[in-house]
Image (tube, coloured by chain):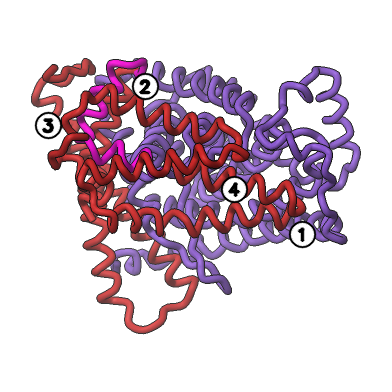
Amino acid sequence: MSDYLDRYGRSKSICHRLPAQLKLWLTLVVVFVAVLVPIQYWPLHGMLVCTIFIGFSLARIPLAYVLRRLAIFLPMMLVLSVSMPLSQGFATGWEIMFSILAGSSISLLAGLWLVNVMPFQQLLATLRRLWIPDVLIALLAFMYRYIFVLWDELDKMRVARRARTYGKAGLWFRWKVSAQLIGMLLIRAMSRAERVHGAMCARGWDGRIRTLE
Amino acid sequence: MHIQDGLLSTEVCVATGALSLAAVGYSLHKLKASIADRIFPLTGMMAALIFAGQMVNFPLPFVPVSGHLVGGVMAAVLLGPWGGCVALTLVLLVQRFLFADGGLLTLGANVLHMAVIGSIGGYAVYSWTLRFVGSGTRGRLAAVGIASWLTVMASAALFCLEFRLSHSVQQFEFGRIFALMVSFHALIGIGEALISVAVINFIWQQRPDLFERPTTAAGPVARLGGALTAGLVVALAVGAFAAPFASSLPDGLEAVAERTGFDDAAISAWSAFDDYDAIPLGDWDGLSVSLAGVGGTLSVFLIAVIAGRALRQRSSPAEAHRE
């Protein structure tokens, strides 16, 4: 689970060697084109998808990983987009449905490619050179550092829950336990934040963000 | 809940983006003022927690899908409005870039709905409600529930408005989509209120000290902004209920659109189908309007019941350690 988001960010390939800024702009251009060009020009969208998949194979990202991410994402999008023709009448509804599906799928694939061809820290460093404020970048880096810690903790607590919930529990009970799961995780996270703050103070934290660049 | 690319027109995306940029910028400015304090690790940790907490599923009755926490009000109650807004923005950014959840152009709209309305609006409603119900256990839980439900409703109402401005007048029946969204989100709002109340109740039992000093409470600005935002959120939610019943509203909006020339600006990608009439689906309007009414009444009732149950649950704190 812990490397699920950007599993191939640290591997090596032609794509990983490209300059980070170039990759960021390429992705942004692809997403903007996919979203802004009307779906009537659908061959363009098809070409974009092909290009992205070529990018995946150049970066040596396994197809299975990409498809698995797509499989989690698509059903939700299908439900949402199918509700368009159902609620809005069919002719306009289909148009909107396909334009949402194409736009969001290409935007997912392009984003997936971007986070898998460079380490997240490098992406943050690139963003810092654009127009994103330092505090936000530093907070993002902090968050990225602890997401996986909290996920692992959550996994342990889930195992504990499974071990103790025998058979089918009632709906109200499961809600209560889930809420307590989040609450417990939050309490632990807050104590951890306070400990981390103590450690930061011990190392001279005065509110200024310093990086190694 | 996330708005995907393709739903809103570019103009609306730019407008919502500018609004949320201003709000998040101001929140960051507020955060910077006290950054040497523990607010920095707390905000980052809260963002990571909400991201992880959204993996916890809450099963729904009768349907094979499950819901999850949004967390705007929860973050605001523990971090204060500005810290909460920044934390939720971080969550949305990571969801956008690592999960591809929500669109890129619509990121501004998503931030506006979940971070700005969710945290700043949510905190305003929360602190406003606390004045009337007192800050005991009962009052706090009620305030959290009301704030969660209202922010979800306000976001839904705002989305309808944005959707309406994104598409030309002939294409959609505004009332229909409004009723659909509002009745649907009345139920989602109950879910969010229930989860938030349950989580806050648990934390309140275990660590009441976490509530003592919201880390970015902002003095007179918060109070003034609080009253303003509370009014806005309440008005939006009331509008969401009144709109399906007041059939004159779409006409009023159309008049506004024509007068301001927004009609021309809102030409969207699929304008080739402008002159095609949408197929009427029978008596949909009446059904959705009554659904909205039923949903609203039901949700207020349920919140009351849940608040009562949560209070009773408090009498057995030993159970809390079982997980």
Say which quadrant the C terminus of chain B sits in. Answer: bottom left
A97 with respect to B101 (left or right): right
| Mark 2–mark 1 distance (CA, rounded to whole Å) | 42 Å
Residue A114 among magenta residues: yes
How many residues crowd mark 3 within 10 Å: few (<14), some (14–19), many (20+)? Answer: few
Q: Residue B275 appears at what percent x and percent y?
A: 83, 38
Can you identify the residue that label 4 sits on? A98
| Mark 1–mark 3 distance (CA, rounded to whole Å) | 54 Å
A29 with respect to B19 (left or right): left
Q: Are marks 3 and 4 in contact (CB under 8 Å)?
A: no
Depth check: B103 or A42 in front?
A42
What residue is rendered at 39% in x and 44% in y? A50
Residue type highlighted by circle 4? Phe
Which picture quadrant has residue B270? top right
Q: Residue A200 appears at what percent x and percent y?
A: 14, 28
Q: Mark 2 belongs to which subunit? A: B
Which residues are the magenta region? Answer: A108-132
Residue type highlighted by circle 2? Leu
Can you identify the residue that label 1 sits on? B291
